[in-house]
Amino acid sequence: MTDHKSAPALDRSDSRVRHDEGIAGAIRGFIDRVRSGDIGMLPVVVGLVLITTVFSAINPVFLAPNNLVNLLFDAAAVGCISLGIVCVLLLGQIDLSVGSMSGLASAITGVLWMKAGLPLPMAILAALGAGALMGLVYGMLLNRFGMPSFVSTLSGLLALLGLQLYILGPTGSINLPYASPLVRFGQILVMPAWLSLLLALVPGALMIWLDLRNMRRRAAANLSSPSLSVVLAKAGFLTVALIVAVQYLNQGRGIPWMFGLFVALVVAMNYALTRTKWGRSMFAVGGNSEAARRSGINVNRIRLSAFMLCSTLAALGGVLSAARLASSSQQAGAGDVNLNAIAAAVIGGTSLFGGRGSAWSALLGILVIQAISNGLTLLNLSSSLRYMITGGVLAIAVIVDSLARQSRASHGRA
């Protein structure tokens, strides 16, 4: 008799467990994840807010619409390079040659276009092809000979730098026409206001569509899922934030097409990492390559794809840098390009230890770095201070990542 009476009670209890908890439950779940060490991109968002607050308080020009537009122009090239770094960091690898690869791609574009007379699209494709080929070499050195990526890419850094100097020749610089489509893309072209506002509505609409589809699938599997109120609240907050930001930037020159290209690449990479078999394999290999191999994942192929993507995106960053500077020179890819590209990925939340990260890390991280650079430039401070501050921010990001890993490990043992 007791069994018959308790069964319905258990069913009702299960249904309450599976029932959506609403916004309050979502907030509690977020707090629990943070306490367990799953902090995601929270530190970089907080850091970006603090940086913006400090610089705008010291110099109000920092938040002027046109200054922010220039910041977005400057962020796109290194942001593309950082997006490639995210791929190799997810595997627990590194590519130290991305700066040299971007410089070589800039040189290849300028030489083939201005000196050899090839059409601009063919010159750009040749530069991207060189990047893909270099990534293939790194992947093969790791797969066939077990050469650590630190060593192979450090060798590549020197070799690519030498090749860049050789291609450019004794002049060391090739000026690109200011009226050309490439330079206009890197310096002038911005989206129409109506188009940028329309695009600002897309992320929220996609979030609602994807979350509703996920809710239906989880409901069919009798699993818990966020409530509709949570989905609408997140999408609404994102949409309002984007509309306000776009409207503010449109008071200046508007959203650069070059930055729009970077964001489109981030969205495409995020989709590939989170919703494809390849993306799941990337995280699996980065978490435990031997376990991934035993589960049937072709680890060598995943490594090849990551290094090829990284070098190709580095080459694209070099092309965009040439567009921004209107020249292909020996200075392209030099200086702090390597530092900023790797630092952006790590500061944005991608772990140096592999298995954790996001395409959005590149976007948030490069915004932090570019905000620091832009703010210090407005204050007429030397580049030496920018190096020290960026290095300090990178060290803090790695410390936060290490502490989060320790917190997750202790929480898992508990």
Image: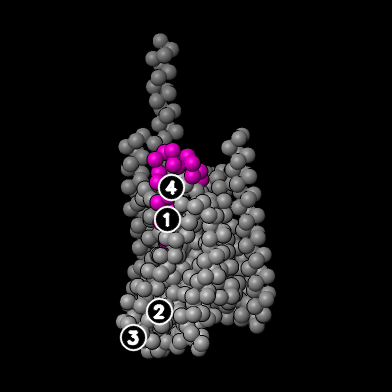
Q: Give the CA distance from mark 1 to mark 3.
A: 33 Å
Name the residue located 46 percent from the left edge and 52 percent from the top edge: 144
Where is 320 relative to 38, above or below? below
Pointer 4 or 3: first along the chain? 3
Residue 397, magenta (yes or no)? no
**SS majority, magenta:** helix
Looking at marks 4 and 1 on the same chain, the residue that comes earlier in the sequence is marked by 4
Describe the element under mark 3 as helix, strand or loop: loop
SS class, disc 2: helix
Q: Say few, some or many: other residues with alpha carbon within 10 Å of mark 4 (under 14 / 14 to 19 / 20 or more).
A: many
Residue 323 visible within the image: yes
Q: Residues within 10 Å of mark 2 (few under 14, many from 20)?
A: many
Q: Quarter of the image holding residue 111? A: bottom left
The residue that mark 3 highlights is: 117
Q: Measuring 53% from the left and 60% from the top, which residue is drawn there?
A: 152
Q: Which mark is residue 299?
A: 4
User: Measured from the top left, where is residue 326 in percent x and y?
Assistant: 45, 85
Disc ID at residue 109: 2
Evaluate if marks 2 and 4 touch, with contact meaning CB atoms under 8 Å apart: no
Magenta span:
287-308
Q: Is the residue under label 3 in contact with that under label 1 (CB below 8 Å)?
A: no
| Amino acid marked by disc 2 | Thr
> Along the line of sight, which residue is nearer the eye, 244 or 267?
267
Q: Where is mark 1, residue-wise?
A: 304
Q: On the picture, is 299 further left or further right than 409?
A: left
